[in-house]
Image (cartoon, grey):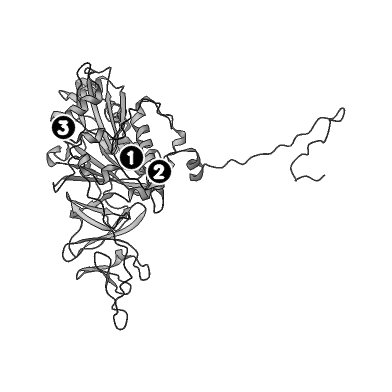
Amino acid sequence: MGHTRGQRPVSAGRDEPGRARTRLVIRMNHRPRTEMDRSMTDPFAKLTHVGPGSPTGEFFRQFWLPIARSSEFEADGAPIRLMALGERLVGFRDSGGRMGIFDHRCPHRCASLFFGRNENGGLRCSYHGWMFDVEGRVTDIPSSAGGRVPTRVRAKAYSVRERNGLVWIYMGSRETPPPLPVIGVVADDEELEIQMWLRECNWLQGMEGDIDAAHLAFLHHGGHDPEDVGEHFVLKWVTSGRAVETKVVNTAGGTMEGHRRPESFAPDYWHYTQQLLPSWTIPGQNPFEVEEPVVRFWLPMDDTHSMIFQLSRPRALVDGRSAFHAGVAELPGVKVRMADLLQPNNDQDWYGRWRLTPSEENNYFLDRDAQAKGNYTGVQGIQIQDKMITESMGPVVDRTHEHLSASDLMVSRTRRRLLKAVDAYATTGDLPATLDDTELTRGLMAGGGHVPEGTDWLQYYRDVAEAAGADPRILESDLVEATEGVGA
């Protein structure tokens, strides 16, 4: 019987007397794990893919998404490269001040419209001169004899609105888009203080850092003691009890977390954080009675890049930094302002806008001497510390290597809530009630307070929120207290 070269044959039948039995040894070649491997073993890998046709990408496309500041565009100014959900786009403001956002490919021969001319009420492709209005209609074809303008050919244009100093884009399938969202201070025509930062990693791992209660006492304030923070109540609470006890509920629009610090000087104080579909967070900072809300949106640019929008009323900032940290601005690791670390915007690059100078290439300006003298990470700036940690996980974290603990309950529940919502849309077309009923999220609150003895943490939040005018229905749909384990 023949055998493959390099393999030893196995003896047939019984061993011959005095002769050792031979064995077939097969050596397996080990290969690195692929994205397909992760998708088969990580139930949440689906949430990291946002391109056209992906379940999570199609889910995101049903919502209005902030994509830029209104102030980035000038009438008849140069087109700007934008990215959202894996699509390369160009944005421009026409002669009349109207915004347009297109797929960057001209429908004629697919040349990029980024190189076009924004003039005379439209965007003109520099290849053959085709002109498009903000809705994508062809208005001029000077390169064709007779100049006949086709009515069925259009640039792929998305619905655009402006509100709160933001440019919003709707990339979904509805002929009539849903209303613009109302989320805390992101409401009506209120002008907001807008800060933006590029994060070079997947949107989900970035957003999860925003709803992680435990990391504040380590990543940002691990080198600080209660006596270092003066009369700052919340930071004294954080630094006097670093372990958290956390509870989570599903809401009509996402998840809400409440946590206390049982070993702190104020064990009856509970802090509340909101996550709203698809990728909004209201992390909360101060006690409810003095809270100046900060709302964040995590825009998936593609699978490996995201844009953070931090939105607040102007009074929530002091000297360009969060009012929460204004009183402790000289603490090691805190004192740098993000505005001082922004690179000049490069709208010639798909990833050139709102980049922070500290990056993986320069180790985020890590200072080991500072790390030994009170700066827990050796890195300056709250957002830089978050950027360092989430980008260090890789462009898309492989969650099969994770081992979650009890303090990760909000992260675990939010993943499940997102996955459930994405699967519901993919299979039945169902979407969260908050998409069309924006009153559900008007006045939604985050922050903290002292929960009286004998009062349930959730009932306390209901009482505070309803007294402030928040819609109580937000906590009546799909309300499930998360008492099960944190694993997948």
- Name the residue tied to disc 3: 291
Please state which of residues 10 and 7 is positioned toward the viewer in this rendering.
10
**Most distant residue in the left direction:** 315
> In the depicted view, which residue is nearer to us: 365 or 425?
425
Q: What residue is rendered at 34% in x and 43% in y?
A: 203
Q: Residue at x 50, y 45 (%)?
A: 36
Residue 39 can be seen, yes or no = yes
Q: Quadrant of residue 479?
A: top left
In the rendered structure, find residue 206 and report the number of the disc placed on it: 1
Please tell me how crowded label 3 is: few (under 14), some (14-19), or many (20+) other residues with Cα within 10 Å.
some
- Quarter of the N terminus within the rendering: top right
Amino acid at dot 3: Glu
Mark 3 vs mark 2, CA separation in Å: 35 Å
Question: Which residue is tagged 2?
Answer: 423
Name the residue at the bottom extreme.
146
Q: Earlier in the sequence, mark 1 or mark 2?
A: 1
Q: At which x and y percent is residue 425?
A: 37, 46
Residue 52 percent coordinates (x, y)? 39, 54
Find the distance from the CA under tag 1 to the CA under tag 2: 22 Å
The disc labelled 1 sits on which kind of residue?
Gly
Counting residues from the start of the chain, the first of labels 3 and 1 encountered is 1
Q: Quadrant of residue 116?
A: bottom left
Tell me the CA gap for discs 3 and 1. 24 Å
Helix, strand or loop at disc 3? loop
